[in-house]
Amino acid sequence: MKTVYAKLGLALACTAMLSGAAMAEKWDMPMAYSATNFHSEMGVVFADKVREYTNGDIDITVHPGGSLFKGGEIKRAIQTGQAPIGERFMSAHANEAPLLGWDNLPFVATSYEANEKLWQAAKGKVNDQLAGLNLVTLYTCPWPGQGFYFNKPVASSKDTQGVKFRSYNTATATFAEALGMIPVQVEAAELSQALATGVAESFISSGSTGYDRKVWEHLTHYYKVNAWLPRNYVMVNKGVWEGLDAGTQAAIQKAADETGSACAKKSEELANWYFEQLASNGMSVEDASDEFRGELETIGAKMTADWLEDTGADGQAILDAYKAN
Ligand code: PCA
């Protein structure tokens, strides 16, 4: 008799384990940047934390480098539920939802601290706009400050006329046009190819993307401008999110909050290291000349004014809240 009960107990335990395993939801998480980039590495940290905090109920697999969906397709894939979760460059969506360009305002918030303050001011309205797009933000993470890459020395806009420029969103295309350049939008994953084939000979970005894409193979000069610190964000489909019980949501949010702050710290730690790598691979890494910087500031002020026009009272409220803090 004893053995029968023991066997029955074992059978019940196995059934429980099986149904526990069947409950685990598998989530594919497309990310746009290379596997070794800190954003992608942090995506893996996030997935590990989610697995841990949900006791294995949510099992996320990260697909970096645009391997599952290309950068430009990720948001739509999540909106439509083709993927439950993913990561994308936030200001890439500013053409469709202008508030999402909050982190692309030239010279408004140029340190990690200021960028975080601006995010705190923007967060509520930005998340509302994303909810309207069927998306829930889990965490955001800044890139290091943005500067210009060229294949020659550049002292002012006299040197930028007619230069082919790789943009990553509408705002950077506008910036380039104001400098007499010819913009073409290219994902970071395709940047090396664009430089190798001469489709682009210049771009604006952090030291991070220049390092990831080994741009010293094609370009010679980096000018530190620190114009803005744009953010990536990890988002989940709103319906998928609302289908989770409160405990699972809280566990995922805890993982997201921890990963978001760790990711911002990592970005800050790496910012100068990237410059050192560019320099040790033969690039000239310098501050932009006063003349060039002055021109960039003039163009930047106009871009911020345009953003305020596009976003109206909401954009103004974000900037006012930022300045008041
Ligand atoms: N790297 C990304 C976005 C901002 C950055 O620093 C890129 O160039 O695509």
Image (cartoon, grey):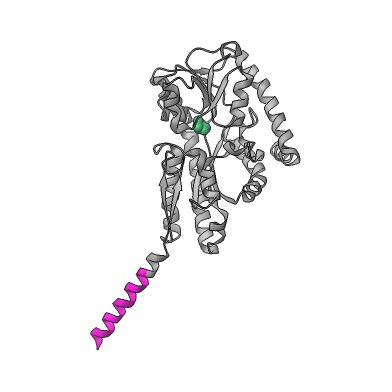
In front of the other: 117 or 44: 44
Above/below status of 248 relative to 231: below
Q: Position of residue 74 (x, y in %)?
A: 50, 43
281 sits left or right of 87 in the view: left
Q: Position of residue 131 (x, y in %)?
A: 62, 51
30 sits left or right of 117 in the view: left
Question: Hey, which quadrant is residue 314 in on the image?
Answer: top right
Question: Hey, which quadrant is residue 172 in on the image?
Answer: top right
Stretch of the chain drawn in magenta: 1-18
Q: Which corner quadrant holds the N terminus?
A: bottom left
Q: For residue 105, say whether it is visible.
A: yes
Q: Can you name the residue that lies furthest to the right here?
A: 313
In front of the other: 217 or 289: 217
Question: Hey, which quadrant is residue 183 in on the image?
Answer: top right
In front of the other: 96 or 288: 96
Above/below status of 159 relative to 35: above
Instruction: Please say whether residue 164 is one of the residues in the magenta stretch.
Output: no
Instruction: Please say whether residue 14 is one of the residues in the magenta stretch.
Output: yes
Residue found at x 55% / y 38% = 231
Q: Position of residue 304 (x, y in %)?
A: 69, 30
Q: Position of residue 223 (x, y in %)?
A: 52, 19
Residue found at x 44% / y 18% = 219
Q: Which corner quadrant holds the C terminus?
A: top right
Above/below status of 305 relative to 158: below
Residue found at x 64% / y 43% = 120
